[in-house]
Image (cartoon, helix red, strand yellow):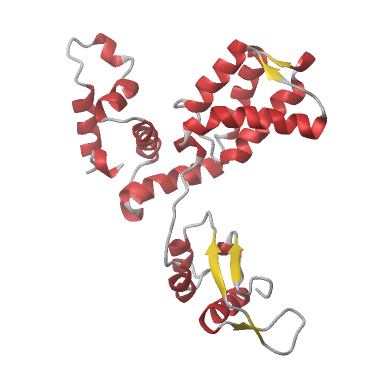
Amino acid sequence: LRKADAGVLFLDEIGELGADEQAMLLRAIETGRFLPLGGDEEVSSEFQLICGTNRDLRRSISEGTFRDDLLARVNLWTFELPGLSDRPEDIEPNLEFELKEFRSHTGSTVRFNRRARERFLEFATGMEGRWPDNFRGLNAAVTRMATLAAGGRIREELVEEEIKRLHQQWGTAETTRAENGLLEEVMGREAAAELDRFDRVQLNDVIRVCRKCTSLSEAGRVLFARSRLKRKTKNDADRLRKYLGRYELEWDDL
């Protein structure tokens, strides 16, 4: 706070602050004064504040872990940063960046062969690419493949092993919590809580697919890719519209 006087203060993961720190920060925002660590006299600081969090702070308020008056103070402007799975166009350039980072840390130059690179990008940017850990997960995946690459070359077999490993990792309870958050975002907490487990899993996948597609028809073609081959009439958009209607959802809601 003292160093930020006449400047900008960025507090990351503000949702992790304890009750005492929240009270201190609230007073500093409102009055420009605070008691420094180890001091017995208040000092002043005038600063612009930017906060970051991966928590739903309104939920934290309802759970009693975050102050509503502090959120009211810091929530003047809100910017939502989409996750990596919603930005597939960022994966390919960052794939090259991660390999350069690996070289700078280890001194080893590692490259994908052409087919291995195509296979990894197909997986990473497609419907399977969930990336709940965002860029940390991409960094870990590339680091593992680069470390295990014989002769500095990542081949298809290594990519397939990594894809299998990622599928196993993404089947954890943490991912389940993230998926539940997606349903609550679209439907609201009360409506999402009324869903059976079977419906939650199915609807969550449908929503993820829809968000990666540009139209109802495109999403329908992806979701009904097998069954549509047996149909004379390709009414993918109508089938998807009726499915969403069961949950009182429309395309724009997603």
Q: Nearer the viewer, residue 2 or 125?
A: 2
Residue in the image at 48% along x and 35% along y:
85
**Quarter of the view holding residue 156:** top right
Q: Nearer the viewer, residue 196 or 104?
A: 104
Q: Is residue 78 left or right of residue 96?
A: left
Where's residue 26, x and y in %? 54, 78
Question: Split into 4 quadrants, where in the image is the C terminus?
Answer: top left
Residue furthest front as drawn: 6
Q: Nearer the viewer, residue 33 or 57?
A: 33
Where's residue 112, x and y in %? 66, 17
Residue furthest right as drawn: 107
Q: How many marks?
A: 0
Where's residue 225, x and y in %? 33, 17
**Quarter of the view holding residue 169:** top right
Residue in the image at 43% along x and 48% along y:
181
In the rendered image of this protein, does residue 32 appear above or below residue 50?
A: below
**Quarter of the view holding residue 10:** bottom right
Q: Nearer the viewer, residue 165 or 215?
A: 215
Where's residue 170, x and y in %? 56, 34
